[in-house]
Amino acid sequence: MEESNLIIIALFFLIILLGACFGLGYYFGQKKSVGPATCPPSLLDSKMINGWIAFAEGEVKEFSGQNLILSSGEETLKISISEKTRVQKLNPTTRLTEETNLNDIKVGSKLNIQLLYVPKEKLLIGDLIIILP
């Protein structure tokens, strides 16, 4: 009688141990696959996504016509400018921006640009340019 009780108790603890292992494995497995940095691959190919918004900061290397080359360190970025692009200048004393135009952008100007990436055209469009002091 005592042997059968010991076998039942051992099986009971074995079931609890296996359940705990399964639960922990499931918990940690889920934690690895879901997080703030994950993006479903289908989202990148979605036809519903018209573009992405990003920000870039750097110095103007070239500016002609509707194209601007922004550089930071050894990296450069070609940005298209449209008639809808807004340009503002940051006032260093008030830290507020004032509306201005593309004529204030010169080679060597430091800019912060809000970009719109259009995947269909593989194009970066400057949406808002802020000229930094």
Image (cartoon, rainbow, N blue to C red):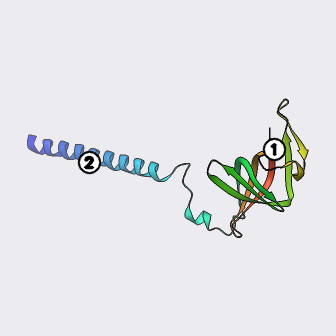
At which x and y percent is residue 133? 80, 38
Residue kind at label 1, given as amino acid type: Ile
The CA distance from mark 1 to mark 2 is 66 Å
Which residue is labeled 1 in the image? Answer: 131
Name the side, left or right, on which 12 lies relative to 59.
Answer: left
Residue located at (50% from left, 52% from top): 34
Between 63 and 55, the one nearer to me in the picture: 63
Choose the circle earlier in sequence order: 1 or 2: 2
Between 57 and 72, the one nearer to me in the picture: 72
At which x and y percent is residue 64? 82, 60
Between 36 and 124, the one nearer to me in the picture: 124
Residue located at (36% from left, 46% from top): 24
Residue located at (80% from left, 45% from top): 130
Q: Is residue 1 visible?
A: no
Which residue is labeled 2 in the image? Answer: 15
Residue kind at label 2, given as amino acid type: Ile
Between 42 and 76, the one nearer to me in the picture: 76
